[in-house]
Amino acid sequence: MRVDQIAAQLYTLREFCKDEQSLKETLQKVRAMGYEAVQVSGIGPIPHDVVKKLAEEAGLKICATHISYQALTENIEDVIAQHKLWDCKYVGLGSLPQEYQTSGEGYAEFAHNANQFAAKLAEHDLEFVYHNHHFEFTRFGPKTGMDILLEEGSKDFGFELDLYWVQAGGVNPIEMIERVDGRMKVVHLKDMQIVDKQQVFAEIGEGSMNYKTIIDALRKIDVEWYVVEQDVCRRDPFESLQISFNYLKQLAIN
């Protein structure tokens, strides 16, 4: 991991990205922290060309996105055009639609559908990446939902593991990283603390996850983008992103 591979997930700052002016200010602040890239997710309805302009003005690369399932299934040509405009290779889906979550058959049906739009993206040199939560580790008979996605997903079905949610799902993050070797170029990083006997989100280096070992494992599978995301911050979200960046910078090799 190099410093220029560390990105900020704008979902962390979603309350500060609702219109053009607030997005402009937020991107400038993110660049000032030391980040050189962002993942676009959770921003307001801002035209694609404006987002591109603001990112370029801030000196930030758009490394990945989260796109709605509806956009991927009903308006994929716009998704392709958007990512080409942004010079952004990785097209992410932030969560499994609820209708597929209740059975193993649902996971398999989703994987079949995703294989189709993933193949379409691949025709344009774009890559589909799936972002997990903890519910994918629900067991349906002998297999978990994640097992099914891994088995039924095609070569074009990539992953964007969220390592906090892997841990919350009761799975060793290192083992899960090894399972997606060759299928993951973007990863989500956040830490976990136990507060009042409950799992809570934490800045990287402030929790109980062994990120030195985790980063070593991610290097071995040649991850391209290390994206910092914190769903809920217990301090100012900008401060949270700065703390995580400062810690990861210590682990970076330049």
Image (cartoon, rainbow, N blue to C red):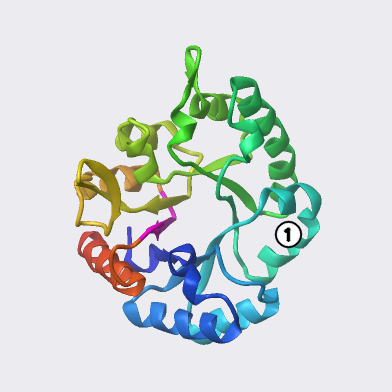
**Circle 1 is placed at which residue position?**
80
Residue 121, position as x, y percentages in the image: 71, 50
Q: Is residue 229 above or below residue 149?
A: below
Q: Is residue 248 above or below residue 105?
A: below
Residue at 44% across, 44% down: 161
Asked whether 39 or 56 is in front, the reply is: 39
Asked whether 169 or 150 is in front, the reply is: 169
From the viewer's perspective, tell me whether residue 167 is left or right of residue 130.
left
Magenta highlight: main SS: loop
**Placement of the N terminus among the 4 image quadrants:** bottom left
Residue at 52% across, 83% down: 22
Residue 21, position as x, y percentages in the image: 56, 87
The answer to whether residue 226 is magenta is yes
Residue 251, position as x, y percentages in the image: 22, 59
Disc 1 element: helix
The answer to whether residue 208 is magenta is no
Range of magenta residues: 223-232
Residue at 55% across, 63% down: 41
**Placement of the C terminus among the 4 image quadrants:** bottom left
Which kind of residue does numbered mark 1 sit on?
Answer: Ile
Query: How dense is the environment of label 1, judged by Cα within 10 Å: few (below 14), some, or many (20 and up)?
Result: many
Residue at 34% across, 30% down: 171
